Image (tube, helix red, strand yellow):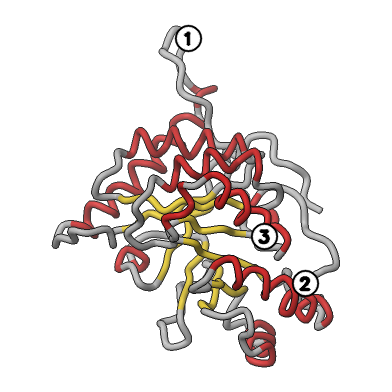
Amino acid sequence: MNRAPLILSAGIGDARLTDHAWAEEMIGLTERARIGLLLLGDGHAAPFDALSIATWLAPRAGAVGLVPTIDTARALPDDVARGLAALDRATNGCAGWQPSTLMPPTVAESVPRGIDFVAATRGRWNEWCAADDRAPGDPPFPPAPLQGHPVLVQTDADPLWSHVAADIVVIDMDSPKPPPGQKCLLRTYTALAGLDQIEALYHDGIIDGIHLTPPYPRRGLQEFADTMLPALVERGLLPEARRTGTLRQRLGLAAMPHAIHPVPAG
């Protein structure tokens, strides 16, 4: 395989995620489908606290990277920075986040606020990662994320995506291509998407993976695991076994300078 393996991502915004039994079933199906990223809320208005759900799912997530959607209009950078740092540690370095300006009510200031929110949150992590540089007697910082920064995911549906340096961007076929250095995932609504097109786009360097948004999560994930996953492996787009390491390592992203004891990739 000449390129890094195809990235598999999925999004669930269903309010049933607040039901622990249903959420646990979904994480099991997600792992069976070898989904590398699970976007909770998937960037849109969700009637639940995605970060709290991700925290509850962390010990049950296995090899799935958990990416909660964060409402930048209502959340506070300090709280989110602490919560995501704790999630990154609970998942052994497999957390991400999707800051969103799409939650109602949307206002003209939502994008500038979102830009400031992302900068402030990243700034907190930089401070905590640099704790060794602090003077003796200074108050302690919270534990930093294992990855330095959790993986930042954006969707082309959110105007914020063109204003922040995301690690991964979810797009449609007619969307503008993200800047160099950002991984690009093609949105698909069915597990029966055209394999020939996906393979061609991947080998041409147009996409790095796919993002599944099934209208019926249980059925969509089951169909993906049963039909599309074996076909992707057979075509050489995925290895026989999952990659190991932190989420950044699994996705082929550059390590952050302050990453703490990164897990060896494999």
- Is residue 139 left or right of 33 when viewed as pictured? left
Residue that mark 1 sits on: 136
Q: Residue at x 72, y 69 (%)?
A: 4
- Is residue 165 left or right of 244 when viewed as pictured? left
Mark whose residue sits in front, 2 or 1? 2
Q: Earlier in the sequence, mark 1 or mark 3?
A: 3
Where is residue 36? Give x, y as percent: 65, 60
Where is residue 108? Give x, y as percent: 14, 62
- Is residue 209 left or right of 33 when viewed as pictured? left
Where is residue 260? Give x, y as percent: 63, 35
The image's mark for residue 238 is 2
Front residue of 135 and 60: 60
Are discs 2 and 1 less than 8 Å apart at CB?
no
Going by the numbered disc 3, the residue's amino acid type is Leu
Front residue of 266 and 235: 235
Residue that mark 3 sits on: 29
Q: Secondary structure at mark 3?
A: helix
Quadrant position of the N terminus in the picture = bottom right
Residue 126 visible (yes or no): no
The CA distance from mark 1 to mark 3 is 48 Å
The image quadrant that residue 33 belongs to is: bottom right
Mark whose residue sits in front, 1 or 3? 3
**Label 1 neighbour load within 10 Å: few <14, some 14-19, many 20+:** few
* 256 over 215 or under it: above or below: above
The image's mark for residue 16 is none
Where is residue 167? Give x, y as percent: 51, 60
Q: Residue at x 63, y 42 (%)?
A: 93
Mark whose residue sits in front, 3 or 2? 3
Q: Secondary structure at mark 2?
A: loop
**Label 2 neighbour load within 10 Å: few <14, some 14-19, many 20+:** many
Going by the numbered disc 1, the residue's amino acid type is Pro
Q: Earlier in the sequence, mark 3 or mark 2?
A: 3
